[in-house]
Amino acid sequence: MSDSAPSAPVTPDDVPGWFFPVDQAAFAWFLSRQTDAGTTGDLLELGAYLGRSAILLGDHLQPGESFTVCDLFDSEAPDSENSAEMAMSYRDSLTRRAFEANYLAFHPQLPTVIQAPTSVLADGRIRTGSCRFVHVDASHLYEHVAGDIQVARDALAKEGLVALDDYRSPHTPGVSAAVWEAVFDHGLKPVLLTPEKFYGTWGDADALTRVLLERDWRGEGFRMDEELIAGQVCHRLAKDPAPAPGPAPRSPAPQRSAAHRLALDVLPPFATRATRRALRAARARRSH
């Protein structure tokens, strides 16, 4: 058995992580459009794992901008709940050394790395209104995520964009609670929903939606749908699966109402299953 370090990644997709193509495309689109429009500002990532998303963020760093990454990496967690979460998911693989090696395989210089709980950023070390893009993918515990969202709000410039990971995963109900609380109680406006990430702003969501729709997503093999949430138009984006082989269905699938689609596509999967059970029960009652 060799003790040599793992070989350097050749492409960002060689880096382990959960940063999928639809979000890679969304990140790159929003960041490049900001640059094209002359919008400047720093980049911030709360929770980096092994660097897959940080590498892409670094691709869009412009002269005069800074990029800050905050993660515990292999440090001890500040509380027992967070420690248990890390032990279950990350402890054996997440190290600062691995993150830095992966990042330096694609960039000549590291971002500013803060090896600490993301809560330390509430002390003002990230200048208020200095960031154009913030990615939050750290703890899944409600109290931590709510704090991270407040850090993002303070850090973002007026028209800045925040991306929040795991807003609908069945194993992260604390993230869902914190995200939708921010929408309904703290002014966060949804712009884009993907299967993994929520994109929103405290600024002009309509302007960001116009930027989003400048690209022909459907023509590039994505599925794009429009929703209305809390009075704000937003869009759902996913990779359109290739059609299954075999004969086409003889009749079209029944149309769902907007509320039904929202329940099935935006709610976390465990809530979606409960919604489907309730709908089946209602149909059964009507048939008797």
Image (cartoon, helix red, strand yellow):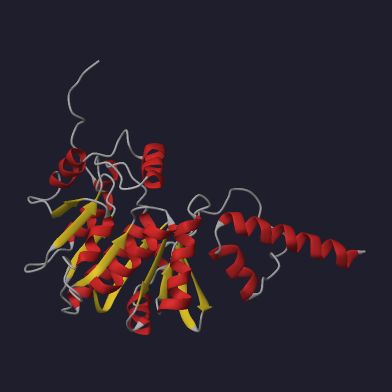
Q: Is residue 129 above or below residue 242?
A: below
Observer-nearest residue: 101 or 69?
69
Classify the position of the C terminus by image quarter: bottom right
Q: Tell me where residue 169 appears, x and y as whole percent.
A: 49, 54
Q: Please indicate, yes or no, whether residue 9 appears anywhere in the rendered image.
A: no
Q: Tell me where residue 13 appears, x and y as whole percent.
A: 29, 45
Observer-nearest residue: 273 or 251?
273
Classify the position of the N terminus by image quarter: top left
Q: Quadrant of residue 65?
A: bottom left
Observer-nearest residue: 114 or 201?
114
Q: Is residue 142 above or below residue 108?
A: below
| For residue 79, side relative to residue 12 (left or right) | right
Q: Quadrant of residue 45?
A: bottom left
Task: Name which residue lies at 23% across and 44% down.
Answer: 11
Task: Name which residue lies at 32% across and 33% down.
Answer: 92
Q: Which residue in the rendered view is the most extreme toward the top?
A: 1
| For residue 253, side relative to residue 172 (left or right) | right
Q: Tell me where residue 98 appears, x and y as whole percent.
A: 20, 39
Task: Name which residue lies at 87% across and 64% down.
Answer: 285
